[in-house]
Amino acid sequence: MQKLSILIVEDGQSQREMLRDFLLSEGHVVAEAENGEKAIKTVLNGHFDLILLDYKMPGMDGLEVLKEIKRINPEIDVVIITAYGTIETAVEAIKVGAIDYITKPVELDELLILVNRVAERRQLIRENELLREELGKKGVTADKIVYKSPRMAEVINMAGRVAASKASVLIQGESGTGKELLARLIHQLSSRANKPIIVVNCVALHENLLESELFGHEKGAFTGATSRRIGRFEEADGGTLFLDEIGELPPTVQVKLLRFLQEREFQRLGSNIDIHVDVRVISATNRDLGVQVKEGTFREDLFYRLKVVTMSLPPIRERKDDLPILIDHFIDKFARENGKNVQGLTAEARDSLLKYDYPGNVRELINILERAVVIARDEYITTEDLPFKSAFPSRDSGKKSASLLRESVEELEKELIAGSMEKAQDNQTKAAEILGMSERMLRYKLKKYGLKN
């Protein structure tokens, strides 16, 4: 586990020393400050990964200190320490930029889990920075590889780790999430990058044509086969074969693909000669192959051969942190491509884009933004340029509309939390994972909505 440089900001000497001694025993580098003014001076004169910040202190309170720390260095992680009865203040701090909070009296086991989570996240960020540097050295542009959320950071990090292997990779995800893009990234990071990546959409061709497309055929193998044809496996020799929509693969082709994955050989249609090629197979699906195995439409042995490594791409509604940078990236891209002087969006247009759930995922977002850039009359895209402009109230809808919207959102949130708790059988850890929030935030919400016994 990566060791962190941690600053403890706490006016209580005994509490501060207890936290210091514990963190030192875990191998971290620790500094101390007994008030906000000293904390800011310490941050200005040193480097810190994490700050444990008491909310209630004489002089500057925790919120003031937090704002100043974020102004100095927004990349420092800050955890608020607060009394249980003032959790609302901690939630306010999270809105300003704190990553989490912990209540007094501080449980050391809980603190250790939190610190380890910060260390894992920072290590992931560092590995991804190195990955981007490696992509740059290989001449791979960062175009479309745009993300900020921890979910996507984990996916990209996994791509970097599996790229060097020969293992087959199965990419799962809804339509439009970027499965082919991820496959290309894995290929570009691998030792096969100077060889081709061949893409085959398994649903685009009839069963007989698909078998010939993949494995090739000899002259006379079937009616219309007037000459020998080299298949995609041979074209991809030394490189990567990406099989999109693998769940649509017909049974006869499943058998031949299984044989290749087991023996690394195949035969062209109309031939009994074995052909050996060095090809890595990356496949993708938006279906549940496990269900297809149970239904008998997909071979179980092939399923396990394909999923040596499984990667899941989250839909955009589950990684809303990525939306702001994706929006800005594609507006800039399409403005340059179309020679338009589009500088950005109005506040209402951005609000609409951030609230939308994108059932078509990134592909739909790209389509919406390209259209908006092309038809925009001015430097800023407005709600009139968006296909769902009437779906959300504007700022001028009045306080009553805003209040009704807030009540609706809170009611929906309450239902989601109640449903998740029921699904998790009242296990708060599992429910928090389902909802994508910390356990502490879940406990606050349970209390807020009166859902906790």
Image (cartoon, rainbow, N blue to C red):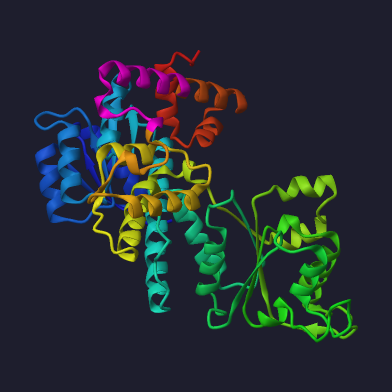
**395 magenta-colored:** yes
- Asked if residue 27 shows in the view, the reply is no
Residue drawn at the location 48% of the way across and 37% of the way down: 436
Q: Quadrant of residue 424?
A: top right
Tell me if 378 is positioned left or right of 226 in this view: left
Q: Position of residue 184 (x, y in %)?
A: 54, 68
Is residue 217 visible in the rendered image? The answer is yes
Which residue is at the front of the view, 88 or 355?
355
Question: In front: 45, or 208?
Answer: 208
Q: Is residue 187 left or right of residue 325?
A: right
Q: Which residue is pictured at 26% across the width and 51% down the height?
A: 75
Q: How many marks?
A: 0
Identified at 15% across, 31% down, the residue is 61
Across and down, in percent, residue 277 comes to 73, 82
Tell me: 241 left or right of 350.
Answer: right
**Residue 135 to residue 80: above or below:** below
- Of residues 342 and 109, which is closer to you in this image? 342
Is 129 rendered above or below residue 102? below
Q: Which residue is at 66% across, 79% downward? A: 236
Above or below: residue 264 compared with residue 168: below
For the stretch drawn in magenta, the main secondary structure is: helix
The residue segment tinted magenta is 390-412
Q: Is residue 162 magenta?
A: no
In which image quadrant can residue 146 be found? Answer: bottom left
* Image location (x, y in percent) of residue 282: 64, 66
- Which quadrant of the rendered structure holds the N terminus? bottom left
Residue 227 at x, y percent in the picture: 81, 86
Residue 245 sits above or below residue 51 on the image: below
